[in-house]
Amino acid sequence: MKLQLIPGDITTTAADGIIVSLCEDSERLGVPTAAVVAVDRLLGGPIGGLLDSKGFKGKAGEVSVLHTLGRMPARLVAVVGLGKQKEVTVDRVRDAVAEGCRALRRLGCTSIATTLVGAGTVGMGPASCARAIAEGAGLGLYTFDKYKAPEGPAVETVSIVVKDTSD
């Protein structure tokens, strides 16, 4: 698996699947991350619909996969929960990315892109988040296939998409 940091916008990134994150109290705060808002608008509101219907609460370990239906370059969007914003840790980010990667791999994605999941929550900087994303992707996509055939194609690339690469 190749891990890369690329400048750009998650909504225009060429990848089979993308990962965006929500905290459990995003609804109460009024504004989820800019990436979630942009993806939700582009897709016509399914993430907001999930929150409104209580189908997704943003709890730690929660994952919901949405089809983009051709509205953006990515085929699938995995929305991962981080739990309450004050309780977000590097471990939670790592676990959320691992769950998102597993969900997208099961659906046949060979390239995955994500934003800096967890950046700005409880003093977590971009470097800590990038490290947790790299670890989560590695752990989530690891397969022991010495005694069995691989299940579908492997994920070849995981990209961390950032608006400004100067950090």
Image (cartoon, grey):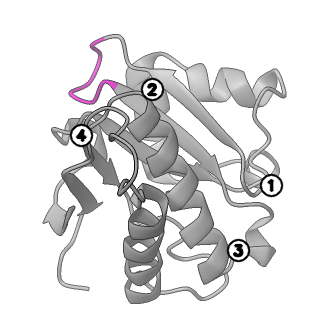
Judge from the rendering whether residue 137 lies leftward or rightward of residue 71; answer left or right. right
* Residue type of the residue flagged with mark 1: Asp
User: Would you name the residue on which mark 2 appears?
Assistant: 41
Q: Residues within 10 Å of mark 2 (few under 14, many from 20)?
A: few
Q: Decide which of tag 2 and tag 3 comes sooner along the chain.
A: 2
Q: Decide which of tag 1 and tag 3 comes sooner along the chain.
A: 1
Position in image of residue 17 (x %, y %): 33, 36
User: Would you name the residue on which mark 4 appears?
Assistant: 110
Q: Disc 2 versus disc 3: distance between alpha carbons?
A: 25 Å
> Closest to the observer: 158 or 106?
106
Answer with the quarter of the image where residue 5 lies. bottom left
Q: Which residues are magenta?
A: 70-75
Answer with the quarter of the image where residue 3 lies. bottom left
Q: Residues within 10 Å of mark 1 (few under 14, many from 20)?
A: some
Residue 25: which disc? 1
Secondary structure under badge 4? loop
Position in image of residue 51 (x %, y %): 75, 31
Q: Disc 4 versus disc 1: distance between alpha carbons?
A: 32 Å
Q: Disc 3 versus disc 4: distance between alpha carbons?
A: 28 Å
Q: Decide which of tag 3 and tag 4 comes sooner along the chain.
A: 3
- Above or below, 40 relative to 122: above
Q: Decide which of tag 4 and tag 1 comes sooner along the chain.
A: 1
Q: Disc 1 versus disc 2: distance between alpha carbons?
A: 20 Å
Could one spot residue 87 in this view of the protein? yes
Q: Residues within 10 Å of mark 3 (few under 14, many from 20)?
A: some
* For discs 4 and 1, the disc positioned in front in the rendered view: 4
